Image (cartoon, grey):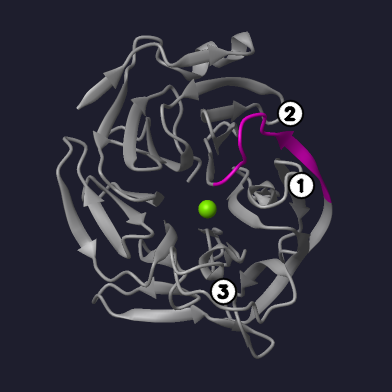
Amino acid sequence: MNSISSPYRIDDPRFQALIQKNARLHQIAAGFEWTEGPVWFADHQHLLFSDIPGNRMMRLTLDGHVSTFRHPSGYSNGNTRDRQGRLVSCQHGTRSVTRTEIDGSRTVLADSYQGKRLNSPNDVIVQANGAIWFTDPTYGILSDYEGYAADPEQSARNVFRIDPVTGKVEAMITDFVQPNGLAFSPDESLLYVAESGSSHDADVPSVIRAFRLDETGKILSDHVFAEIDKGLPDGMRVDAAGHLWSSAADGIHCFHPDGSRLGKILVPEVVSNLCFGGTRGNRLLITATSSVYSIAVNAKSAV
Ligand code: MG
């Protein structure tokens, strides 16, 4: 296990209260192709994550023990849990969002919109009322690396909502180049969505947009919340106090709810995503290129 000391860059003194200055960044697993989709299972004290090109999902305990959770995984990407604790996954290979039931069977929650196949669902979150939101960029069908190459059937790369009562899939946000990670503010009045379109077009700004919602999920307004200055935003999480922790090329960027960047936790590999976990829920678990990293912080998940 490699440990890296003092990986912090402080942009704002308020960041000091959110970190543990003596905490080390630990590389707790390595040797994967492209890690993504971390989700913490507190009841089992393990992390599940995707190795997308490896077409597998792994199970990792914080002492570094890794085992295969699912292979093949349908080229899974983002993962989360619903309020009943069930695993919800985005799968590039099947171009679907699935739920793993308590008995282990899988239910397809979404695989088409207006009669056409989805592009390649990327990341997913669940609201308190059970509504499921996911992004649908084209990364998983661009080549045979993270799925199966195909021409998109959708005319846009949307942010979708699955209705908790009817199961209807509805496009809620339709003007992204490539929508990617997403997260809610603690009171769920704001939805944050990452624009990662600069991956293939340098003219697309690497921004996180914030959308104000009503309780039915209708978008009331939106604005640019923050810009990522190194690489692009992919997965993100919001802590209980409303700070947004985003992936970036040089590590994790932490933003105050007012949008100002408080600081960074530098990571030696490009970060794809993160989640909170550990026995006290105050550890960042970071998927970064070929590895998973862990670092204690002074923040906990909003959910
Ligand atoms: Mg992603």
CB of mark 3 near ligand 1 (< 8 Å): no
Q: Which residues are magenta?
A: 222-234
Instruction: Of the two numbered discs 1 and 2 on the same chain, state the one appearing first in sequence.
Output: 1
The residue sitting at 19% across, 59% down in the picture is: 68
The local crowd at label 1, few if under 14, some if 14 to 19, many if 20 or more residues have their Cα within 10 Å, is some
Amino acid at circle 1? Val
Q: Nearer the viewer, mark 1 or mark 2?
A: 1
User: Residue 223 magenta-drawn?
Assistant: yes
Q: Are marks 1 and 3 in contact (CB under 8 Å)?
A: no
Residue 248 in the image, given as x and y percentages of width and height: 56, 35
Find the residue positioned furthest to the right: 221
**Structural crowding at the residue carrying mark 3, measured as other residues with C-alpha within 10 Å and reported as few (<14), some (14–19) or many (≥20):** some
Residue at point 23%, 53% (across, down): 59
Specify the label residue 204 is tagged with.
1
Residue at image coords 43%, 63%: 145
Report x, y in % for residue 223: 82, 44
Q: How far is the residue under mark 2 from the one under mark 3?
A: 30 Å
Amino acid carrying label 2: it is Asp
Under mark 3, the amino acid is Pro
**Mark closer to the chain start, 1 or 3:** 3
Mark 2 surroundings within 10 Å by alpha-carbon count, few (fewer than 14), some (14 through 19), many (20 or more): few
Question: Is residue 243 found left or right of 209 in the rendered image?
Answer: left
Secondary structure found at label 1: loop
Residue picked out by circle 3: 164
**Image quadrant of residue 108?**
bottom left
Q: Tell me: residue 24, above or below residue 94.
A: above
Label 1, label 2: how many angstroms apart (C-alpha)?
A: 23 Å
Is label 2 in contact with label 3 (beta carbons under 8 Å)?
no
Rounded to the nearest angstrom, the CA distance separating label 1 from label 3 is 33 Å
Q: Is residue 26 magenta?
A: no
Looking at the rendered image, the disc whose residue lies closer to the viewer, 1 or 3, is 1
Res. 2 in view: yes
